[in-house]
Every structure is written in structure tokens, then in C-alpha cells.
Image (cartoon, grey):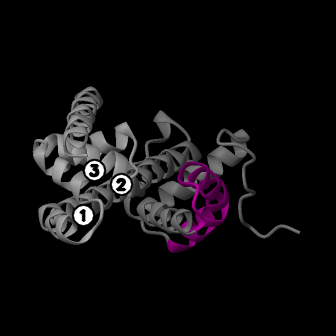
Amino acid sequence: MSTGRPSRPRSPSGSPQVRAELDELLSRVAAGDPDAFARLYDAVSRPVAGLVTSVVRDAAQSEEVVQEVLVEVWRTAGRFRPDRGSAMSWVLTVAHRRAVDRVRSVRAQGERERRNAVREWLRPFDEVAEEVEQHLEHEQVWRCLGALSRAQRESVVLAYYGGLTYREVAAALEEPVGTVKARLRQGLRLLGECLENTG
């Protein structure tokens, strides 16, 4: 029994009839027709969700992005040009762009939080090292660390006490990986010499 709504296309291309129906619906959405939007929503929401989920790979985030995409479709439907492609292709292009933007945003936020955490951890290093020198049995290690340059000390502490990889240390200090490796080699050599002399 027909519901009066267009069937969901099996692919972005779909049949010519489905393409024509979706093109017309999107044009009506551009004119502010809420009924057309409801029908378009039913037709494109599943393909949009599939595409977004494949890019974002997080259920909660994907659901948010799908809603953002459909709101954007409602708001910007007037930008659709049938002579440049199908309505489904246009909608999926919007979806892909939104999904990629979300992934980049989440990654950037995670990177900022990680760098801030590292900076917060490094900031009190001098005070912590002082206290360690007075109270812990490994005070000579910390004393020798204090003799290194700040750049060498930060690299050594992050790599061997923070457990970060070369690349993670480089990202935290915003330095090239090669520079970090060189500092670590030099810092460890100086640290070893210091420990031999104080041991």
C-alpha cells in the first residue's frame, strides 16, 4: 500500500524517478514547505546516518551530526542546483563535510586537552624536583636532571617518566621529532655521566 512518500533510494544515484522526486522535494524544502521536508527527511535520513557513522565512528557523535546535517539541509536547501547533481548527492555532500568537520574538531580538542595536561604537569616540575631531592631516595637522579637544560630535562621527563613516545613528546613540546630525539640522546648521555660521578 502506498504511503505517498518516496521510496528510499538504494544508492546515491537511485532510479531516475526517485532522483526526480527527491530533486522536487528539495526544491520545495527551499521554498519552506515543511511537509516536503518531512518526506525528504524520511528518504535521506538512513543514507545520511550510514555515511556519518562510517566517518565519525561514534554512535552519540554520529547522532548529533545527523541532526546537524538535516537542520543544515532545511536551512540551506536553496543552494541546491539540480543541474549540478542529484538531491541525494547534494545532501550526502553536506553530510560528509559535517562528519569530517566533527572528526577534526574532536581530534583538535583532544590534542589541546592533552597538551594542556602536559603543560600543567610540567609547570611545577622545579618545585617537585626540589621536594624530591629532600625526601626521596632517588634524589641524585633528580639532582642530575636539574643539571640538564630545560629542553633536555622536559624531553627526558616526558619520555621516561611520563611514558610518552618520541612523537608524543614532540607534539607536547611543539618541536620536530628529530630535535626531540637529539635532545633525548644528549640528555641521557649527560644524565648518565652525572650519575656516574655522584654514584
Up the image or down, 100 lies above or below 3; here it is above
Which mark sits nearer the N-terminus, 2 or 3? 3
At label 1, which amino acid type do we have? Answer: Trp
Q: Nearer the viewer, mark 1 or mark 3?
A: 3
**Residue that numbered label 2 is attached to:** 162
Q: Mark 2 belongs to which amino acid?
A: Gly
**Residues in magenta?**
34-59
Q: Report the amino acid beneath label 3.
A: Val
Q: CA distance from mark 2 to mark 3?
A: 6 Å
> In terms of depth relative to the viewer, which is nearer, 110 or 30?
110
Find out whether residue 36 is within the magenta segment: yes
Left or right: 60 in relation to 13: left
Relative to 24, residue 40 above or below: below
Q: Main secondary structure of the magenta part?
A: helix
Tell me whether the residue at label 1 lies in contact with that at label 3, contact meaning CB atoms closer than 8 angstroms: no
Q: Residue at x 41, y 61 (%)?
A: 72
Kindly indicate the quadrant of the structure image that contains residue 71.
bottom left
- Looking at the picture, tell me which residue is in the foreground, 109 or 88: 109
Q: Residues within 10 Å of mark 3 (few under 14, many from 20)?
A: some
| In contact (CB < 8 Å): disc 2 and disc 3 | yes
Query: Could you give the CA–CA distance between mark 1 and mark 2, rounded to whole angstroms?
Result: 9 Å
Q: Residue at x 53, y 54 (%)?
A: 56
User: For mark 1, does the 10 Å Cα neighbourhood hold few (<14), some (14 to 19), or many (20 or more) residues?
Assistant: few
Taking the spot 60% from the left edge, 62% from the top edge, the residue there is: 40
State the residue position of label 1: 121
Image coordinates of residue 149 in percent, x first then y, are 10, 42
Q: Indicate yes or no whether the magenta region holds residue 142.
A: no
Which structural element holds mark 2? loop
Residue receiving disc 3: 157
39 and 111: which one is in front?
A: 111
Residue 102 pos. (x, y %): 42, 56
